[in-house]
Image (tube, rainbow, N blue to C red):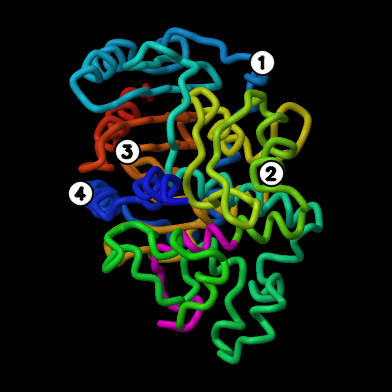
């Protein structure tokens, strides 16, 4: 257990600096959260055309100028990456890889995606609700933990819902970004991770305020295991990964209750991460099958929490905002891991980075990529 903790501490959360820079990037351009994020998401998703193929077996490539991007600008961006701690970058425009970079030269290499894992957990919750495994997003969380529920007397805690966990608004006292120094070691040191989370005292009423909580993601992982009878990874393989062409065995840290680390700990190749982003770009549809419910994709990538004041907005385990004048949403992880989705530009961009002191490193590069789209 000690070895596990020492390996995953830095994977447990998104660094505070990432949130600050995300906000500053948006504020510097005068951008702000859309007042009606859900409706805006629906409108923008209508602009994404049906792809002319699905990258289930393999991605196709194209020259940037063939897909409406400035090839010279993109080449300049790629040429600058060896000077930065960027380990990989994949740019998918209109369903084609128009540029990619691998510091180690291996497109199949898998990277720790850290808190990007949370967005995958969110997708699995949506699938489980659609299947009737989980009742509803507004279900009280303690319904899934009857022993804890029987012992609980706090009415506010009893009112915490699955939606509150997904939007990081549970109200639980969770000092992940303060006294715990951006890690979740106290949870990792406990024998029962979800019990540790749910037995924390209440700091606010559920829904009142955003407070980044990787423990909530872990509770969701346990709920998935309880309701599906499978670990999160097994459920993901069956319902998410294999249907979109991610067929290799992936590494994902386990948890004491036989599930997986719901908020961190998964390793994926950049091309496979791009498949996940491409799935969301197309409203959860892949080929002729709806993998993630369309309304779940729209709802998850709409704003449900203010985040930290002035530092960004949050959906259901997705970050939501704008960059270079474009609405986008992204899965983001410590050290510069990102899956960006820009619906109006039919664009998915993946970064894997080794940047522990600046998780925001890919953001100015992403701005340049958006600006390289013609028109």
Q: Name the residue: 46% across, 77% down.
A: 171
Q: Is residue 56 left or right of residue 42?
A: right
Mark 2 or mark 4: whose residue is earlier in sequence:
4
Residue placed under numbered mark 1 in the picture: 57
Q: Where is residue 87 in the image (x, y as percent from the top left)?
A: 33, 24
The secondary element bearing badge 4 is classed as loop
Circle 2 crowding by C-alpha within 10 Å: few under 14, some 14–19, many from 20: many
Above or below residue 73? Residue 116 is: below
Residue 346 drawn in magenta: no
Foreground mark, 2 or 3? Answer: 3
Mark 4 or mark 3: whose residue is earlier in sequence:
4
> Quarter holding the C terminus?
top left
Q: In the image, which residues are magenta? A: 202-219
Residue 212 drawn in magenta: yes
Query: Residue 28, labelled with which disc?
Result: 4
Spatial distance from mark 2 to mark 3, Cα to Cα?
26 Å
Q: Do the residues labelled 2 and 1 touch (CB within 8 Å)?
A: no
Number of marks in the rendered image: 4
Q: Where is residue 326 in the image (x, y as percent from the top left)?
A: 38, 40
Residue placed under numbered mark 3 in the picture: 336
Snapshot quadrant of residue 185: bottom left
Residue placed under numbered mark 2 in the picture: 292
Mark 2 or mark 3: whose residue is earlier in sequence:
2
Q: Where is residue 305 in the image (x, y as percent from the top left)?
A: 44, 65
Above or below residue 264? Residue 213 is: below
Q: Is residue 329 visible?
A: no
């Amino acid at each position: 257990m000690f070895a596990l903790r020492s390996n995953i501490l830095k994977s447990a959360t998104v660094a505070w600096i990432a949130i600050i820079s995300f906000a500053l990037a948006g504020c510097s351009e005068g951008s702000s959260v859309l007042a009606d994020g859900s409706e805006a998401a629906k409108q923008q998703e209508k602009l994404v055309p049906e792809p002319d193929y699905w990258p289930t077996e393999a991605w196709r490539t194209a020259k940037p100028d063939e897909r409406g991007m400035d090839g010279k600008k993109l080449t300049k961006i790629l040429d600058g990456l060896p000077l930065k701690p960027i380990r990989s970058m994949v740019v998918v425009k209109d369903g084609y890889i128009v540029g990619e970079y691998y510091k180690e030269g291996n497109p199949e290499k898998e990277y720790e995606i850290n808190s990007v894992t949370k967005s995958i957990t969110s997708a699995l919750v949506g699938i489980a609700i659609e299947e009737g495994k989980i009742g509803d997003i507004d279900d009280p969380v303690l319904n899934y933990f009857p022993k804890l529920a029987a012992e609980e007397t706090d009415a506010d805690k009893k009112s915490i819902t699955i939606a509150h966990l997904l939007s990081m608004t549970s109200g639980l006292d969770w000092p992940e970004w303060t006294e715990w120094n951006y890690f979740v070691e106290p949870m990792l040191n406990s024998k029962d991770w979800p019990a540790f989370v749910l037995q924390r005292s209440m700091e606010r009423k559920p829904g009142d305020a955003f407070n980044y909580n990787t423990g909530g993601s872990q509770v969701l992982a346990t709920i998935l295991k309880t309701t599906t009878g499978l670990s999160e990874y097994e459920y993901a393989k069956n319902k998410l990964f294999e249907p979109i062409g991610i067929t290799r065995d992936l590494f994902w840290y386990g948890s004491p209750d036989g599930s997986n680390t719901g908020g961190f700990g998964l390793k994926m190749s950049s091309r496979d991460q791009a498949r996940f982003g491409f799935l969301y770009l197309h409203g959860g549809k892949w080929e002729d099958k709806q993998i993630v419910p369309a309304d779940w994709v729209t709802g998850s990538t709409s704003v449900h929490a203010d985040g930290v004041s002035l530092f960004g907005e949050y959906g259901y385990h997705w970050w939501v905002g704008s960059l270079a004048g474009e609405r986008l949403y992204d899965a983001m992880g410590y050290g510069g891991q990102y899956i960006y989705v820009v619906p109006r530009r039919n664009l998915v961009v993946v970064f894997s980075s080794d940047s522990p002191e600046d998780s925001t490193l890919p953001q100015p590069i992403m701005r340049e990529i958006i600006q390289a789209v013609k028109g």
